[in-house]
Amino acid sequence: MPIRWIAVARDVSIVVGLVMVSSFASAQIIQAMGEEVTALPIGLSNFFWGTVGFTISGSFAGVQRFKHLLIVAVGLWLISFVNVAMGLTPLPIWVAGFLLILAMMGLGGALSYLFVRTPQVVSSVPSDPKSPPLN
């Protein structure tokens, strides 16, 4: 299966958009409640909405879902390097963050099967009438 780069860009955009909006919204809500913004609620929000993003992406993917999601995960991870470049995240944390992205990808990909099943490939070769059915 060739890589559909347009679909990868779409899905990376979906996950990045959900994570960015959720980070901003979480920080605003926490500040509005008069609390200090810490990494834990922002991280939990990112994990939840990142998983939702991968679920949506997996639902769009169709065949070879996890291959597509892995490419999306690498894209998300590479884009998150902006945080290192801006001095917001230390390099070792960014490198280890790929494990968290893989966890979101795996959970979101698995959840996507609840919404859209993988299409079955139908063979165009006529079956032998003497062979038993494949049940």
Image (cartoon, rainbow, N blue to C red):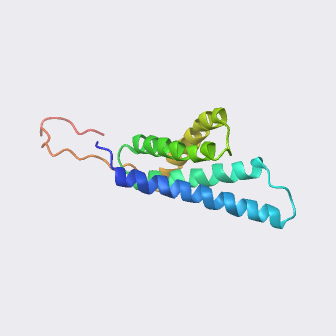
Question: 125 above or below 61?
Answer: above
Nearer to the camera, 1 or 111 = 1
Residue 123 makes an appearance in the image: yes
Nearer to the camera, 51 or 93 = 93
Nearer to the camera, 55 or 130 = 55
| Residue 105, position as x, y percentages in the image | 53, 44
| Residue 73, position as x, y percentages in the image | 50, 43
Quadrant containing the N terminus is top left
Residue 114 makes an appearance in the image: no
Q: Residue furthest right?
A: 34
| Residue 85, position as x, y percentages in the image | 60, 44
- Which residue is pictured at 36% across the width and 55% down the height? 6
Q: Quadrant of residue 26?
A: bottom right
Q: Residue furthest front?
A: 86
- Which residue is pictured at 67% across the width and 57% down the height? 23
Q: Residue furthest bottom?
A: 32
Q: Quadrant of residue 97?
A: top right
- Which residue is pictured at 12% across the width and 36% down the height? 130
User: Is 51 on the left or on the right of 72, as rendered?
Assistant: right
Q: Quadrant of residue 69?
A: top left
